[in-house]
Image: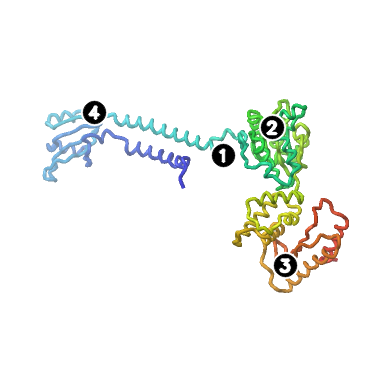
Amino acid sequence: MKASWRTILLWALPALVIGFFLWQGSFAPNPATMGKNTASTRMTYGRFLEYLDANRVKSVDLYDGGRTAIVEAVDPELDNRLQRLRVDLPSSAPELITRMRDDGINLDSHPTRNDGAVWGLLGNLVFPVLLLGGLFFLFRRSGNVPGGPGQAMSFGKSRARFQMEAKTGVMFDDVAGIEEAKEELQEVVTFLKKPERFTAVGARIPKGVLLVGPPGTGKTLLAKAIAGEAGVPFFSISGSEFVEMFVGVGASRVRDLFKKAKENAPCIIFIDEIDAVGRQRGAGIGGGNDEREQTLNQLLTEMDGFEGNTGIIIIAATNRADVLDSALLRPGRFDRQVTVDVPDIKGRLEILNVHARNKKIAPEVSLDAIARRTPGFSGADLANLLNEAAILTARRRKEAITILEIDDAVDRVVAGMEGTPLVDSKNKRLIAYHEIGHAIIGTLVKAHDPVQKVTLVPRGQAQGLTWFTPSEDQGLISRAQILARITALWAVEPPKK
């Protein structure tokens, strides 16, 4: 894995600091160690005077303003060979120079070189430049990281994902089973593309559209389809991204979002899970969360305040419309509420046709039969059903999805993962009697739903299951059906005294 520039700089900057001080202390040039001053053996000043008295000194080179001397002297202990010795001279000994001249010693003085100052100046200039350049590059790179140091002063900016030409990959043809909601939202797309059709007759497009419905029914999918169909700038943000720990940040983000939207009008703003910020004010402990309420107040003002937001259409999604503030739902803000409910049998069949496009399904599999077996399933449930069937098909090394994989997928989605089959025992027989009792009562009682399947294979928390499939979608339930279900339940599980 290649290291990023940010990681390299984090390791390189401390190394530069340590290296600079080592270089300053160990490798900075010292005048006393330049030129001929290469003697490694030191000699005391007293011994140097003894050598002078014995006429053993041949030459003296003075360095560092006369404070250091390199002496060439004859050492009798080394067969009178010349030896280079280093001597530290006292600063106040002018008579010493006179004495060496009188003795005829070859005396030479070397002026102090200022190379150390040059090197020190270069070191003092180069290192800060490198350090500042590295820090600048580091903070510039970290500015693109969410929460990085470069964004320390930009936490009040909107975090909305912005697409100039929304290419979500989803069109209205990809959304099925919610035709009424599609028809309502197609007007929004038409207004964005051909506003003159509405303005010619004095019509005003709703400022806001609220999508309400259970989870998995396709609210976010509808917003993506609107963006893909309209071809206008599209802002997408979650309601929870407005609220932060710091008071005022959420309101600042709302202002920044609408400022960007006005600069790119006409456009669409999609707020997912708006109940995170749009809950009724004053409902919390102690009057509610001040930060959330300030954010909601700013949102209300931007949607319908003194300044208009012409050309901005706000689409929001929630499955808790009952907790939203009444000021948010009034005409002029969210003018239109579109209910996106679970599909009926016709809608389920259309959804299955959409999700079956990229799957290999055996010819004998009837999508209509699957639609009838799955009352109450949302679009997400049906997509998950076909995906589970495809996974089982791949696991069993089959080339196409058969009705067996569909049945197992339905059982898995409804009741959970299949458990270990029960061994033959008294407990298994009791469970069999129990499930057969459900099936018999469900068959004999006229108003009861027909039996679809009885199994002793454990699934989830149940040791056995009996499925009943209604002949049609039931929006309402009759008294006879209620009594039939009570009869089937009481006959197998009588109340305890």
- Give the x, y percent position of residue 408: 68, 61
**Mark pair 4, 3: CA separation:** 105 Å
Residue type marked 2: Leu
**Which of disc 1 and disc 4 is earlier in sequence?**
4
Q: Which residue is mark 2?
A: 192
Crowd tier of the residue under label 4, counting other residues whose Cα lies within 10 Å: few below 14, some 14–19, many 20 or above: few
Crowd tier of the residue under label 2, counting other residues whose Cα lies within 10 Å: few below 14, some 14–19, many 20 or above: many
- Give the x, y percent position of residue 369: 74, 57
96 over 419 or under it: above or below: above
Q: Quarter-wise, where is residue 318 in the image? A: top right
Q: Which residue is mark 3?
A: 456
Q: Which residue is mark 4?
A: 111
Residue type marked 3: Leu
Residue at figure coordinates x 30%, y 35% from the top left: 29
- Give the x, y percent position of residue 45: 21, 37
Q: Which residue is mark 1?
A: 146
